[in-house]
Image: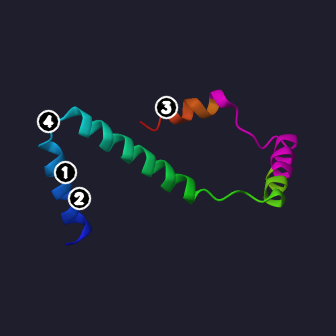
Amino acid sequence: MNLQTRKLNFVQEFLQLSNEEIIDKLETILKQERKKYFEKSIKPMSLEKFNSMMDKAEKDAREGKVTEAKVLKKAIKSWD
């Protein structure tokens, strides 16, 4: 059975549940597993990379290569 079929079967079973305690447990498990997966995918930045990014940000600020937050917010509103 492929993953898509398994997910559909799970959703069908889930929709038939009427026991709130089971739903609570499933929600808890889902949240915990998502958190674990997310935390595994995070790779810490090296100190060298961090310092390099900070140096570039400071240089950009000195050279005026920055965008004010209000200008950026206005631009974002136009994306809708």
User: Which marked residue is nearer to the observer: mark 2 or mark 3?
Assistant: 2
Q: Position of residue 66 (x, y in %)?
A: 75, 40
Assess whether residue 61 is covered by the magenta stretch: yes
**Segment tinted magenta in the rendering:** 54-70
Answer whether labels 1 and 2 touch (C-beta < 8 Å): yes
**Residue situated furthest left in the rendering:** 16
Q: Any mark on residue 18, and which?
A: 4
Mark 4 or mark 3, whichever is nearer to me: 4
In what element is the residue under mark 3?
A: helix
- Badge nearest the viewer, 2 or 4: 4
Q: Residue at x 11, y 43 (%)?
A: 16
Q: Amino acid at mark 3?
A: Lys
Residue ID at (15%, 50%): 13
Observer-side mark, 1 or 3, equals 1
Q: Nearer the viewer, residue 49 or 38?
A: 38
Query: Which residue type does callout 4 highlight?
Result: Ser
Residue matched to label 2: 7
Q: Nearer the viewer, residue 39 or 19?
A: 19
Side of 13 relative to 53 (left or right) = left
Which of marks 4 and 2 precedes in the sequence? 2
- Residue 11, labelled with which disc? 1
Distance Cα–Cα, label 1 vs label 4: 13 Å
| 19 vs 30: above or below | above
The x and y percentages for residue 75 are: 55, 35
Marks 4/3: CA–CA distance: 42 Å
Q: Which residue is mark 3?
A: 77
* Structural crowding at the residue carrying mark 3, measured as other residues with C-alpha within 10 Å and reported as few (<14), some (14–19) or many (≥20): few
| Gap in angstroms between the C-alphas marked 1 and 3 | 36 Å
Q: Residue at x 49, y 48 (%)?
A: 35
